[in-house]
Amino acid sequence: MKNYLLIILLLCAGVYNGYGQKKQPSDYHLQRAIDLIQNGDEKEAMKCLDQQLQETPDNADARIVRADLYYRQKKYGNALSDANLAIKYYKKGGMFSKYIMYWNRGRTYCDMEDSAKALADYDTAYKLALKDKKGATNIQEILYGRAQLYYEQKEYDKADADYAQMLKNDETDQSAMVGLIRNMIARKEYDKALELANKCEKYDADYEETYRYRMQIYDKMGETDKAIDDAVIYFEKSDAPQHYLLKSIMGKHLSYALAKVQAQIQKNNDHSWKQLRIHIYKWGYDYANAILCYNQLQQEFGSFDFIYYSRSQCYNEIGDTEHAIADITKCIELGDGKDYYAIISRADYYREGGQYKEAIADFTKGIELDPTSAYAYYKRGWCYELSGDDDSAMKDYNTGIDVDKTYPYIFLMRGALYLKRGEKEKSNADFEEVIRQDTVAESGSCRQYALHFLGRDTEALEWMDKIIASDSMGNGVYYDKSCLLARMGRLDESVAALRKAFEKGYRSFAHIEHDDDIDAIRELPEFKHLIEEYKAKPIRIEADDEQAEDKIETISEIQMKKMYSGVYEIPCTINELPLKFFFDTGASTVTISSVEANFMLKNGYLKSDDIKGKEYYSVATGEIHEGTTIRLREIKIGDAILRNVDASVVHNQQAPLLLGQTVLERFGTVTIDNINSKLIIKQK
């Protein structure tokens, strides 16, 4: 919806341009700005608007267009200033109607969370649009925006009235139906909501929001499997499904959700379903299977930074620090070496493994990349503490608080260090600050430790139990409880909580070895036996990297025909269709001519859902061309197979079929034998 008003502005401008005799020469820069916006160049458009308003500061049309650009940049003060002046200078016969100006300003107030002013502007915009012939096309959007404001204010009856008016204007408006459904859910009118959701589905079964809300209705009614059925449909139809919603539904019956997703993978070998399967494994803390699935993705689609990044997290969860560091290092190397989150992740892995020097080095890199991140100062300070350098630790805690006073954990760490130094007044002030800020009982909360340090152990345990209730399937929460109980001196209970963490899959033995939170139980025979027991029960990864090294290497030799410098003709099959590709060492991707693509589509070698959209590609000459993107489900060269490869369709019948070297390298190790004109591919 945020881009909708800009579209309206452009459409209005297009209509205005239709009667050229009314077009004023003084509007040149405004017209130029609109052309630039249509071409996606908002930066240059802003320059034109600035110039227009220098020449004609009372130009209401230029004001409202610039207000919209400021809004999109989240420069709300500038947006309001221009919108106010647009309303002040408005004259009939201009490019834009007056209701658009109030609508624009109302939307800005909405984002600034000034609901009263936003509602006032939406009211005015609606009344003006009713009187404006051009406003008829925007009535629904204005009503929808006002209804959203009413919903956020929990004025459901007023929101209902706007949605009802939308349906009176257009009985097929599914967004209005979903608005009513959402209000019914808020009022716990689940039967009525379900009835309307079923009706909504009949108007257009592809409307994703129907399933997004119906799955929530079923969930509220306790019909978990039906909710999961709708969650699967929602995921299929949505371009950007909300994973927190999917987790909240699927997490209640993971085995059923997994079975439904596995069935989709069998029907449609699409990477998005495979990624959802990984999410389900991770939601169930089954990191071993998640790693196996990441291995399969890598084998099928090649090495991508997100695979290394995500898989490293899974390795870390099962205590395999070595593989976690190896994967996150590959992720960093695939990029420009400046990925803040990847570098900080590696620093955390080093810290948990007791490699404090390496961790400090990476946290330092993170601070250089983002000097305002309290997290990096907190973690580097902790590493200094664990290394025995309390002065450097205190310096980092102080700096972290200076740059961000809203991060509770850094106050906790500084408070604990003050306490260690005997500065109780300062430590208590920090612990009280933690309690003031940390008010949500969820995994990652540290309030319980602050309560303990303040001598409020009963409250601390109550808070810890609330955290566990919010994430009962997790293992980290039980480890936190073990740490808390150890600090309280409740040693037997601490060991019992640690056992629970291990039973849930916790395996960070390196972290346990260096964590001073559990020093109180470290020498207990029960603790030592527990560690030995679970070190002997590692979470095993079948077909892990070591086993992969034992796989037999296969070598494919393919006869090539040299065409000209850097280009060779190679026989292959595409989706089981025998073809000949040009291997172009200068190309960066795969291209295929429209002749072959059309033949493949007409004869069943391509499916309609293999057609994806537009892409720009380069060739050996360095030229950039535009083509349609398709997915080639299988490329086979000799005995080597690559699946799900994106290719650009060149709309030129003379264009060759090109296979770029960067894509070819996904098969494995590639060697060109120029003497014998052979392509040699080595795979494991």
Image: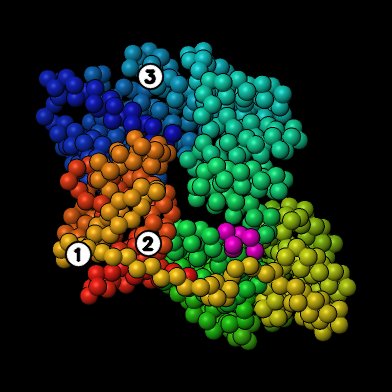
Residue 212 relative to residue 95: left or right: right
Residue that appears at 65% across and 64% down:
288
Q: Residues within 10 Å of mark 3 (few under 14, many from 20)?
A: few
Q: What amino acid is labelled 1 in the image?
A: Lys
Over which residues does the magenta segment extend? 288-293
Between discs 1 and 2, the one toward the N terminus: 1
What label does residue 562 carry, if any? 1
What label does residue 638 carry, if any? 2
Q: Position of residue 453 (x, y in %)?
A: 76, 70
Residue that appears at 33% across and 22% down:
98
How far apart are labels 3 and 2 at the CA level? 58 Å
How far apart are labels 3 and 1 at the CA level? 61 Å
292 drawn magenta: yes
Q: Position of residue 488 (x, y in %)?
A: 83, 72
Does 373 appear above or below 634? below
115 drawn magenta: no
- Residue 622 visible in the snapshot: yes
Q: What amino acid is labelled 3 in the image?
A: Thr
Does 69 appear above or below 616? above
Q: What amino acid is labelled 2 in the image?
A: Gly
How far apart are labels 1 and 2 at the CA level? 17 Å
Q: Between residues 610 and 284, which one lies in front from this camera angle?
A: 610
Q: Residues within 10 Å of mark 1 (few under 14, many from 20)?
A: some
Name the quadrant containing residue 17: top left
Q: Position of residue 294 (x, y in %)?
A: 54, 60
What label does residue 137 carry, if any? 3
The secondary structure that dominates the magenta segment is helix
